[in-house]
Amino acid sequence: MVVLETLVKPLRDADLIVETLFRSLFDASEVNLIPTTRALWEGAAFLRAKTGLKTPDALHAATALHAGCTLFVTNDDDFHRVEDLPIVVLDDLA
C-alpha cells in the first residue's frame, strides 16, 4: 500500500526524478516492506471500525502495530486516534 500511495503523484506528474528517488528508498536495506496478510487486513478492519480511519490508513496503522513500529512518521493527525501507535506528525515539528 505504501508503494502505491507514494508513487501515484510522481507517476501522475511524470516526475521521473521523484519516482526514481522513491523506488531507491524502497530498495534500501534499511527499509522493510511488510507483505499484507489476512491478519493485517482484519486488524485494519478493526482499526477502521474503532477509529474511523480510511482503509489505506487503517492498513498502515495495523501493519505498524503488528511490526512493533517504534516511530510512525506522518502528516496526518488522524493517526492520533490509534492507541499504542507511536506517531510523530511532521507539521508539529515545523
Image (tube, grey):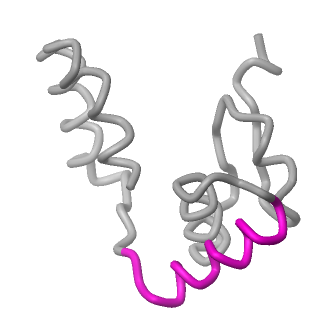
Residue extending farthest to the bottom is 39
Magenta stretch mostly in which secondary structure? helix
- Quarter of the rendering occupied by the N terminus: bottom left
Identify which residue is drawn at 57% across, 59% down: 55
Identify which residue is drawn at 55% across, 64% down: 59
Quadrant of the rendered image containing residue 88: top right
**Residue range of the region highlighted in magenta in the rendering:** 36-51
- Residue 39 is covered by the magenta coloring: yes
Q: Is residue 81 above or below residue 19?
A: below
Given residues 39 and 74, the one toward you in this image is 39
Identify which residue is drawn at 38% across, 41% down: 5
Quadrant of the rendered image containing residue 25: top left
Q: Tell whether 93 sits left or right of 45.
A: right
Quadrant of the rendered image containing residue 76: top right
Residue 47 percent coordinates (x, y): 73, 70
Residue 56 percent coordinates (x, y): 52, 54
Given residues 20 and 11, the one toward you in this image is 11
Residue 81 percent coordinates (x, y): 86, 53
Residue 7 percent coordinates (x, y): 27, 34
**Count of numbered marks:** 0
Q: Tell whether 18 sits left or right of 72.
A: left
Identify which residue is drawn at 31% across, 46% down: 4
- Quarter of the rendering occupied by the C terminus: top right
- Residue 44 is covered by the magenta coloring: yes
